[in-house]
Amino acid sequence: MVSPVLKWAGGKRWLVGHDLLPTPKTYRRYVEPFLGSGAIFFHLSPVRALLSDINNELIGLYQILRDYPDELWAIMQRHHLAHSKEYYYKIRASKPKDPLVAAGRFLYLNRTCWNGLYRVNLKGEFNVPIGTKSSVIFGNDNFEAVSARLANAEIRCSDFEDVIAECGKDDFVFVDPPYTVQHNFNNFLKYNEKIFSWDDQIRLHQAVKKAAQRGAFVVVTNADHTTVRELYSGFGKYVQLDRQSVLAGDATKRGGTTEALFVSM
């Protein structure tokens, strides 16, 4: 099995690990408009896929992983040998123009920052502090296998609405947006308030509703909050999922929580 190369706040490794993901018996194409770590994609290993995200650095990394895995691996080995607190902040402050170097920077920061969190300031600059991990290379790394898995995937930097608008019959659409809620009544919003609003949640609901009407099999994960459940009322089936929260900096404050899952019918 090919493992995701990224750590990602809100990632869905736990969902596939507990066999909680509803999947259609057959589908022609897998579509994921909020790619993140791609845990569901790597688990399912679909023959055809459309993978997208609005984060151009994230998409750039996946394109490099697909097309230049050996060159990226060499860069990650150099990062591994040079890693230190001083080096981390030097790389964090850099702004490489070369796509290969930029992909290496993105992956290095993801693996060595606090909790794999992606956050930028109002200038669009990555500002997450260094974490506790000392290793840049993971024991299960296999960039060649990741490249092979991505070979038949279209990887696109795009707004979710444009991607979902292309989906219809025989498409399996997995949607895992940032968990914002109406009136900002959730703890996760502080990581996403500048990139995903409640208006975006409304746009997303309309997009997946239309895709389901066109015949797509749609699975949406979201915040298990009254406003979200009300938004998706009438859309397929609602399932409450139990999981452990891992975002708190203090491990003693991490506890059980719930997430919502909606499946088109």
Image: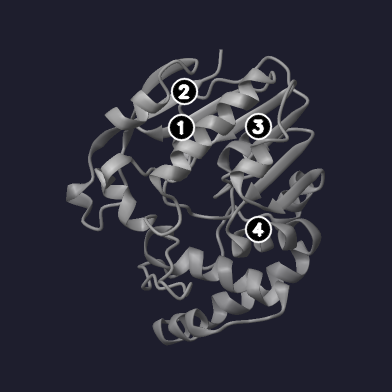
Q: Quadrant of residue 62?
A: bottom right
The amino acid marked with disc number 4 is: Ile
160, above or below 136, in the image:
above
The crowding category of the residue bearing disc 3, from other C-alpha atoms within 10 Å (few below 14, some 14 to 19, many at least 20), is few
Residue drawn at x 34%, y 24% as measured from the top left? 230
Residue pointed to by mark 2: 262
For residue 221, which numbered disc appears in the image? 1
**Could you tell which of marks 2 and 4 lies nearer the N-terminus?**
4
73, above or below 240, in the image:
below
The amino acid marked with disc number 1 is: Thr
The crowding category of the residue bearing disc 4, from other C-alpha atoms within 10 Å (few below 14, some 14 to 19, many at least 20), is many
**Could you tell which of marks 3 and 4 lies nearer the N-terminus?**
3
Say if mark 1 contacts mark 3, CB within 8 Å.
no
Residue pointed to by mark 3: 44
Res 64 seen here: yes
Instruction: Provide residue 140's location: percent of width, then percent of height.
Output: 59, 52
Element marked by disc 2:
strand
Residue drawn at x 67%, y 22% as measured from the top left? 216
The amino acid marked with disc number 3 is: Leu
Colouring convention used in this rendered image of the protein? one colour
Q: Marks 2 and 4, how far apart in space? A: 26 Å
Say if mark 4 contacts mark 1, CB within 8 Å.
no
Instruction: Provide residue 6's location: percent of width, then percent of height.
Output: 54, 55
Instruction: Provide residue 11's location: percent of width, then percent of height.
Output: 47, 44
Say if mark 2 contacts mark 1, CB within 8 Å.
yes
Residue pointed to by mark 4: 59
Drawn side of residue 52 relative to residue 127, left or right: right
Q: Marks 3 and 4, how far apart in space? A: 19 Å
Count of all numbered marks drawn on residues in the image: 4
Drawn side of residue 144 relative to residue 157, left or right: right
**Could you tell which of marks 4 and 1 lies nearer the N-terminus?**
4
Element marked by disc 4:
helix
